[in-house]
Image (spheres, rainbow, N blue to C red):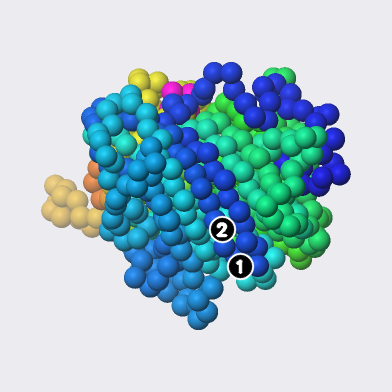
Amino acid sequence: MVRSLLLAALFLLAGVGGFASPEKWFEVAKAPRLANYRISAVLDWPGKRLEGRETITWRNGGEAPTSEFPLHLYLNAFKSPRSIFYKESRGRMAQPASPSSWGYCRLKSVKMGGEDLPGHFGEDETVYWVKLPRSVHPGDTIKVDIEWESLFPQIRMRSGYSASGDFLMAAQWFPKVGVYQKDRWVCSVYHAFTEFFSDFGVYDVELSVPNALMIAHSGTSVPQGGFDARRDPARKDHVVYVLHAEDIHDFAWAAMPRRAWGYKKFSWVRDHRETQIFLYYRAANIHNVERQFRALKAAMRQANEVLFPYPFPVFSVVDVPEDVDQMEYPTLVTAASKTFDPTGNRCGLEDTVIHEFAHQYFQGILASNEVEEAWLDEGFATWFTAKVLDQDFQGYYNSRRLHVGGSALAWWDYWADPTGDSILQPGYRMRDAAAYGRFAYSKPALVLNQLEAHLGRPVMEQVVAAYVKEMAFKHPTGRDFRRIAERVSGRDLGGFWRDHVEGSEVLDVVIERVHVRDSLDGGWKETAKGMFFAAPVPVSPGPQGSVTLQRRGGIQAPITLWVRLENRLEQRVVWDGQGRWATFEFDSPVVAAILDPDGNYPMLKDRLHASYTTKPVRRGLHYWAQIVWGAVMAVLQGIGLG
Ligand SMILES: [Zn+2]
């Protein structure tokens, strides 16, 4: 990983403690290694073009034979306006004028045992279906040899070169096989609002790049004759990096001129295992490196406690230019920081690093299908990020009255349009980018908070620990999470799932009215002399109070109301929430009332209308302060994270 030839010796001395070596990470495979890649590629830096050869060693991990072999050719999303990605992005991809602003992935040959294999494109050119000469039975292994050429587009989503011309993000850069599950291939076209799904394997990658470039990459760099890279005998001024990774399901790298970029190396040691951490930065942003590392340490510590120790020997963060997406790949993430950031806004820097690191687990290791169930990676990553912010950054966005802690941003985002879409909607069927952010990121994070409140923190911790342990290096689904949560908690979560995961209704209960009524006596009375009228007058026990609760949302849930009375007594009552409203009477006027005083419902809409006091001036101040604060935070959040 060390990018300077001069520092190669240091790299060798340092070694990778606890791991076998840069060219062999694990004695025992952690994942079923179904899709293994041996790639050799040459980068034409001025032309932003790449020539590659690869051998995919693929094992049928399904339950039926197949004679097909679909390949993702993701860069064809940028080939023309006819791509599904382009159409679905609805203007998100501005129409670039110059041909070099577009990109493609062109297959030059696909062979097995020296024989050319025929094939055809799928729904669009981002998937190519290869026809195999024979059926591959479950457990059988084949080797497919591919030659291809990639032209990187100017970056619009995740992959390509920066407008500044001094940064290349090589993501989705090689032909990649789909996932064969049971008796069918899962190999979706590249959609605008969804990400990826693939099988685990071993990656051995040789990259020939100009020596003037520094590269950041997935995996470890295998030293070459005592150096970090060897000279490429076939190309002047090129060096060849030999890279290796095990039990990951994607491989990305970035290239940047050494003169404008630097990196710092850190070390993270837990249980006698060292993870080398590389933070790449643009020269102007060097002051942000320490902040990024601190955030990363906090995330790794939290992962160690509530998930499991980060299992890989390396992790890299690239502080990318502003037009490059913040995105996660196995052992490598991109996360931008700002050169001018006088307030040290954690929303832009710490939040992003922690979020992208969380993806090492949620999708990196728990390799759910991001195309179909985006909430399993984005929702869990958002939820995890809030936990780290609460724990190590004093709940920067915390608001006790909202009872949502570090999830305050998600809370504001969710309530902007809580019924607009569904968590279970695949990303590519969501209404737009805002809905994708809301129902793949924000609402799921709140639902996980709600589940924690429902089960109690200790049980929730057991649920999450069991889920990540059981589903690590597999392809979990939402059903797996529910099954494990029900088993560990011993509770039927059917109602919870219906209300919060499957449903689009909201939990919205308010204190609609607080009323005082005198105890009166008087009026018309019948006496021996006939009807007699006495003016009504207050009598003991004196004035009485009442509170009327109203359910404005569709979710019916039992909710507690706490009141303090004028006679100084406190009382708690529980409303079953079944009707639309209920009035509770008290012996004395109500001085203060709080709905959900224990914070059992982080998803309760309007906490500001869920409390009452007889001092309305203070309440008004609080109300507006929180509205303004929330609005400011929502703006800072921008359009969402990668
Ligand atoms: Zn994310």
Report x, y in % for residue 168: 63, 60
Q: Residue 50 carries which label?
A: 2
Q: Please, what is the three-letter code of the amino acid marked with disc 1?
A: Gly
Residue at position x 35%, y 54% from top? 127
Q: In terms of secondary structure, where does tag 1 sit?
A: loop
- Of 534 and 590, which appears nearest the observer? 590
Q: Where is residue 288 in the image (x, y as percent from the top left)?
A: 77, 54
User: In the visual, does 415 lie left or right of 40?
Assistant: left
Amino acid type at circle 2 is Leu
Query: Looking at this view, is 324 or 497 the one in front?
Result: 324
Residue 544 in the image: above or below residue 149: above
How many numbered callouts? Answer: 2
Q: In this view, does 218 lie to the left or right of 370?
A: right
State the image quarter where residue 100 is shown: bottom right
Magenta-colored span? 468-472
Q: Which residue lies furthest to the bottom in this view?
A: 97
Kindly identify which numbered label has been placed on residue 47. 1
The answer to whether residue 281 of the structure is visible from this angle is no
Residue shown at 81%/55% (left/top)?
A: 287
Q: In which quarter of the image is residue 512?
A: bottom left
* 265 sits left or right of 138 in the view: right
Say which element carries label 2: strand
The image shows residue 273, relative to residue 581, as above or below, that is: above
Q: Position of residue 293 (x, y in %)?
A: 74, 43
Around disc 1, counting alpha carbons within 10 Å, would you say few (fewer than 14), some (14 to 19), or many (20 or more)?
few
Are the residues tagged 1 and 2 within 8 Å (C-beta)?
no
Magenta-drawn stretch contains 480: no
State whether the magenta stretch is mostly helix, strand or loop.
helix
Q: Which residue is more in the foreground, 528 or 155?
A: 155
Residue found 32% across the figure and 47% down from its top: 117
Name the image quarter holding the N terminus: top right
Which disc number belongs to residue 434? none
